[in-house]
Each structure stands twice: as structure tokens, then as C-alpha cells.
Image (tube, rainbow, N blue to C red):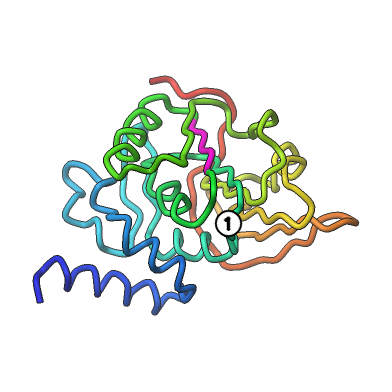
Amino acid sequence: MTDAAELKMRFLYGLRSKGVTDSRVLTAMERIDRGAFVKGLFAERAYEDMPLPIACGQTISQPSVVGLMTQALDISPRDKVLEIGTGSGYQAAILSHLARRVYTIDRHRRLVREAEEVFRKFDLTNITAMTGDGSHGLPDQAPFDRIIVTAAAEDPPGPLLAQLREGGIMVVPVGQSDTVQHLIKVTRLPQGYDYEELRPVRFVPLVEGLGQD
């Protein structure tokens, strides 16, 4: 077995052992090479289950958390998905294999530009990436079937909840940035919202406004 094949097998085994069992999610994560999103000093650690630093003081989430968040979204092939926090673009690339259309927003122009380069390299034509204040969502494209937030808010953000269609699901880390945060799955019901706590996590805080870069 080649080193690359063994690395990929270990990577997928690691995901399964952490609870990522959905076959569509595992297939998407097998097809999207995390190494393409990690640059410089940390490139050789791309296949370890750990968050890694990227530009603009942000991080690429650990693969098992990406997998668990994606699995919790329960995406169908017709879904339109909104991602808040493009970061490296890794999460959006995985979503693109599961959904019909992915919109992703980041407050750092540089991150969006670099992510778009990788999307082109992988020929991922169903992703629209843009620079903007993700805390407001994307009202002109709402409602969304699924919303994923890759930064921690103190509460599930109201503007984002409002952009979720009935029956839609949002996955968001909730909590103060310097204490334990919890991954929350929110389902919009006819009579309101259902909240399910999934697991403890650590994410950078959700910040309003555009980044200085």
C-alpha cells in the first residue's frame, strides 16, 4: 500500500472512530484532500485530527468536528446551504459534494480569495464564496435548507434563524469564546425551534464586521 493510500485509510478510520458514520459524509471527506487547504509549516500535519492555524489568525477545524457537524446537518442533494465562516474553504468543499448549492461568507477577503483558488483547482462549481459580515447571513438568498456556522456565538444568531426554512437545520457552536462551547443543532418547526446539544467544542468567536486585511 502506498503511503498516500495508507494515510487516507488512517484518516477515514479516525473519522469513524470519532463517530462520523454517515457514508455520504465519509465519501465527501475522502474525495476532498485536506492537505490542499493547509499551507506552510503545518502542511505535513494535514491528516491529523487536530485544528491547525491558517491565515488571518483563523484555524481549519479538526476533521472529526467537520465530519460531525456535516453529519448533523443531514444534507440532501437538493439542499441549498449557507456557511458562515469560509476559513480555509475545507468545510465548504465537503458541503459542495452533498448539496445542490453552497453559499459561504467570510469577513476576511484574503481567506475568501485563497479558498476560491482551491475550489477552482477541485472544479467545485456549485460554491459561491463572498466577503461579508456573516452574522447577518445572506437575506437575498434566503430561505436556506441548512445553515452551518463555524465560529462560536453566545446564542444562535437571530438573523440566521430567520433565514432557515421550516424543517431546515442549523448547526452552530454556542458559548463564550474563553469557556466551554457546545455544538447545537437547531431545527425550525412550524411552532418555533427545537434545540439539541451535540457535544463540547472550541471555536474562534463569531465577530461582526469585516476583517482588516
Residue 51 image-quadrant placement: bottom left
| Residue nearer the viewer, 202 or 64 | 64
Q: Quickly name the residue at label 1.
A: 181
58, 1: nearer the viewer = 1
- The correct choice, above or below, for 156 with respect to 69 in the image is above
Q: Is residue 3 magenta?
A: no
Crowding near the residue tagged with mark 1, few <14, some 14–19, many ≥20 C-alpha atoms within 10 Å: many
- Which secondary structure class fits the magenta region best? strand
Q: Would residue 18 appear left or right of 120 to someone viewing this image?
A: right
Q: Residue at x 53, y 53 (%)?
A: 99
Left or right: 185, with 29 as reference point: right
The quarter in which the C terminus is drawn is top left
Location of residue 144 (image quadrant)? top right
Describe residue 57's horizontal placement relative to residue 154 as left or right.
left
Q: Position of residue 175 (x, y in %)?
A: 62, 52
**Quadrant occupied by the N terminus:** bottom left
Seen in the picture, residue 29 relative to 83 is either above or below; the reply is: below
Q: Residue at the location (40% across, 77% down)?
A: 16
Residue at the left extreme, as displayed: 2
Local SS, label 1: strand
Taking 154 as reference, is 75 above or below it? below
Q: Position of residue 140 (x, y in %)?
A: 68, 28
Which residue lies at the image location 32% right of the left edge and 64% below the top edge? 30
Which region of the structure is painted magenta? 102-106
Q: Amino acid at mark 1?
A: Gln
Closer to us: 171 or 121: 121
Magenta stretch holds residue 103: yes
Image spot of residue 205 (x, y percent): 53, 42
Q: Residue at x 66, y 33 (%)?
A: 141
Residue 187, percent from left and from top: 74, 59
